[in-house]
Amino acid sequence: MVIPDDLPRSPTGRVPQWVIDEASGRIPDAGPWRGDEPTVAPTRPRRQWLAWAVVVTFLGVAVALHWSGSPWATTSPTADVVALADEATMTDTGKKMFFGNDPRLLDADDFPGQCPPHAAGCYDPAVGSIVVYQPADERLHGWVVTAATHEMLHAAYDSLSPSDRDAVAALLAATVATLSPDDPTLAQIDASVGDREQIRTTEQFAYIGTQVTQVDPRLEDVYARFLDDRQVVVDAYTTTTTLLSDMAIQLIAQQQILVYMEAEGSAADIAAQRTVVDSLSADVTLLRDQLAVAG
């Protein structure tokens, strides 16, 4: 197939397969959170956060330690990538998985077109690539920590032997069974899997590893090969989701107060309350828009 010159390309000059598919009329599988569709291993579209919502839905037993990273990694990791890996407490093995896939943290100007629609990050084992959207607002930094770790864990899962994956699958299934039916992690896993049931275990591995506090000790031992302190990443996820939920709730409450004041309050009180609502609304909109760029 001849690739048109006007298709979106990555900074390396590569045209993602999903772009070629769309240009040729092929409809890719939907992947609400993450997206890639490599030919060798299942793709992992990741992390779309609905900041406007009150509830933000969300991004081996024996590891082959001789694995030396992706053969495509041709550049040294940037300082911000190294700092992120350290913040996430990635072990040397975890860093091999992360750095070995040429990770890039892209802002609102550079991220669009790098991953499939509605994905805020993606891991493509076919070319050895990890891309993560990095919002400008520092309050969302915890989201970047979680998303980057999520992508690394997909690479980590791919490094396991078939027998190791079977053992991990059983441990993940047992952990999933302990989660409340309304735990958003379950919905996020289902949304990312869609009709590609073959990627359920790797999705469970990444989501549970970054969002679930309590797991089977044997599964914790697996994660410990890639993360020195997995709870740091889970806390980053919890902090960000709590921030977005709290801001949405606060906005609704302040809007209700404004409605009351407009009926009963003085002009000065109404003006002051409107300032509070406008400021909080601007903050919520800013965070929502920064995350929405990923979609």
Image (cartoon, rainbow, N blue to C red):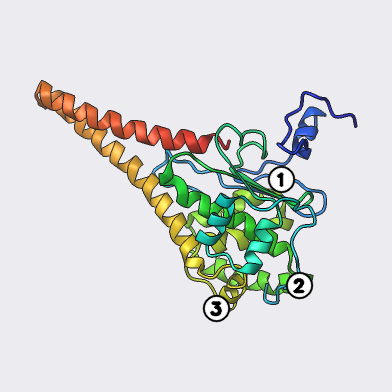
Q: Is residue 57 left or right of residue 127?
A: left
Q: x, y (%) of residue 92?
A: 63, 68
Numbered mark located on residue 36 in the image: 1
Q: Classify mark 2: residues with Cα within 10 Å, few (<14), some (14-19) or many (20+).
A: few
Quadrant for residue 65, please give it: bottom right
Q: Is residue 180 left or right of residue 78?
A: left
Q: x, y (%) of residue 10?
A: 72, 36
Query: In this rendering, is residue 26 above or below 142?
Result: above
Element class at badge 1: loop
Element class at badge 3: helix
Which residue type carries mark 3? Pro
Quadrant for residue 205, please give it: bottom right
Residue assigned mark 3 = 217
Q: CA distance from mark 2 to mark 3?
A: 24 Å
Q: Residue at x 76, y 58 (%)?
A: 70
Which residue type carries mark 1? Asp
Q: CA distance from mark 1 to mark 2?
A: 27 Å
Q: x, y (%) of residue 55?
A: 42, 47
Numbered mark located on residue 66 in the image: 2
Front one among 252 and 127: 127
Which residue type carries mark 2? His
Q: Classify mark 1: residues with Cα within 10 Å, few (<14), some (14-19) or many (20+).
A: many
